[in-house]
Amino acid sequence: MWKGRFSQDTSSLVQQFGESISYDWRLYPHDIAGSIAHARAQLKAGLLTEEEFSSIEKGLLEIEADIREGRFEFKTSLEDIHMNIESELTKRIGSTGGKLHTARSRNDQVATDTRLYCRTQIDEISTAIHGLQKTLVAKAEQYAASVMPGYTHLQRGQPVTVGHHLLAYVEMLQRDKGRLSDCRRRLNVSPLGSGALAGSTINLDREAIAVELGFDAVTRNSMDAIADRDYIAELLFVISMSGVHLSRLSEDLILWCSSEFGFVALSDAHTTGSSLMPQKKNPDVCELTRGKTGRLVGNLMNLLVAMKGLPLTYNRDLQEDKPPLFDSVDTILLVLAVNSEMIAAMKMREDRCLAAASDPMLLATDLADALVKSGIPFRTAHELVGKAVAESVKSGLPLDSLDLTAIDSAYTDTMKSVFSLETALAARTNPGAPSVANVKREIESWKACL
Ligand code: ARG
């Protein structure tokens, strides 16, 4: 492509070192869409005849079909997807193929392709997140009223329901979708026409190209448009954040399916055995989700570090944007799919959840609230209940069987009515709190929204 200036062929080691076709081949549908839009603008500008345009378009569509059907042979010597397609086009339609690159550079071409790729993948990831949310809501509905302990510091804190716990993840995933759509909106501008870095002396209708490719606008500064990879970094962040959410869910499930908790039974289809210990049933999907999240975060770091020292505009370092991008997209899609399937099949062990939540200590705060309702300042109430807790620990008697009135005269006999899980949950009616009525209302609202 640059033979004019050179008298030596590229070393084969350099070819091997510099190629990106082994991974950027998957930009082909976007590369072809971009090329067709570009060619149409050339036609409108009088740079191509109708026949030339048609032969370019037909040639590109045939190449696209060949790649799709696996009939296309990619050449490492042609470095990347852009040159592989262009060279094949010229081979097929002759010298007209050489007109396609007028007023274009691989720099604005690759920027266009990756924006289109990210846009498509954002939609796919968003759909997959949506699917996982539906699965979680269905599970939350099944266990809307199943009481379990809620934890802070991994110590039993207060009673919640399984439904409330699962809906927490639905909230996180909703924010992830919001971040995806923010990212999509910001990236949806067309860099085509920015050329290598300074546009072109040949003016093509950038707006028309943008419209054809579904972009909302055109980029405003050719140098920024060529150097910009913010949209990839943003997407890698959103994917990482989503991975972090699923990694936390994984951690909950890993704990829950241990013998010590025993809150959940994952299906045989979503667990693995041990080659040595016959009794084992391991939550590998959860562990791999947690582990792969490290890769997602690593991919984000990879790109940020690659970008941080680059002067404007294009530098070949930017070719390294794609392996982390593709890896994160592939990984999160797989993570979302497999987690959806696993969660749909899991069964909560409601008896175990209830048993763990039935420790009266979980209602110590409710007892303090009862004292507060009789007019005692919360700090005093906290101390009085603390004394009762200490007495319970010392005597080995459960908190609800102590003679509270003997501990302090502020206690009344009726205050013991707080030691009912049902009452305790029913009282938590503030918006966002886990009363069963609230959780059921939230489930209905999620069902309508999803
Ligand atoms: N394969 C290259 C990349 O992904 C395309 C752009 C090449 N541009 C250049 N000036 N060498 O970044």
Image: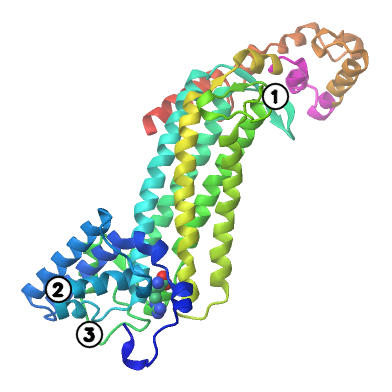
* Marked residue nearer the N-terminal end (1 or 3): 1
Question: Is 233 situated left or right of 69 in this image?
Answer: right
Label 3 to label 2: alpha-carbon separation: 24 Å
What's under tag 1, amino acid-wise?
Answer: Gln
- Residue drawn at (49%, 48%) of the image: 331
* Quarter of the figure with the C terminus: top left
Front residue of this view, candidates 8 and 375: 8
Stretch in magenta:
357-382
Q: Which percent across, then down, holds residue 280?
A: 65, 25
Q: Is residue 220 visible?
A: no
The local crowd at label 3, few if under 14, some if 14 to 19, many if 20 or more residues have their Cα within 10 Å, is few
Numbered badge on residue 158: 1
- How is the structure coloured here? rainbow
| Dot 2 alpha-carbon crowd within 10 angstroms: few under 14, some 14 to 19, many 20 or more | some
| Residue 93 disc label | 2
Above or below, 198 against 111 in this view is below
Q: Position of residue 164 (x, y in %)?
A: 56, 26
Q: Check disc 2 and report its element: helix, strand or loop.
A: helix
Give the label, 3 or 2, closer to the camera. Answer: 2
Regarding residue 367, the answer to whether it shows in the image is yes
Nearest to N terminus: mark 1 or mark 2:
2
Magenta-colored segment: predominant secondary structure = helix
Dot 2 beta carbon under 8 Å from ligand 1: no
Give the residue at x 48% y 24%: 345
As drawn, 61 above or below 103: above
Give the quadrant of residue 77.
Answer: bottom left
Q: CA distance from mark 1 to mark 2?
A: 72 Å
- Which residue lies under the disc numbered 3? 202
* The one of 49 and 421 positioned closer to us in this rendering: 49
**SS class, disc 1:** strand
Residue pushed farthest right?
Answer: 394
Ligand 1, by image quadrant, is: bottom left
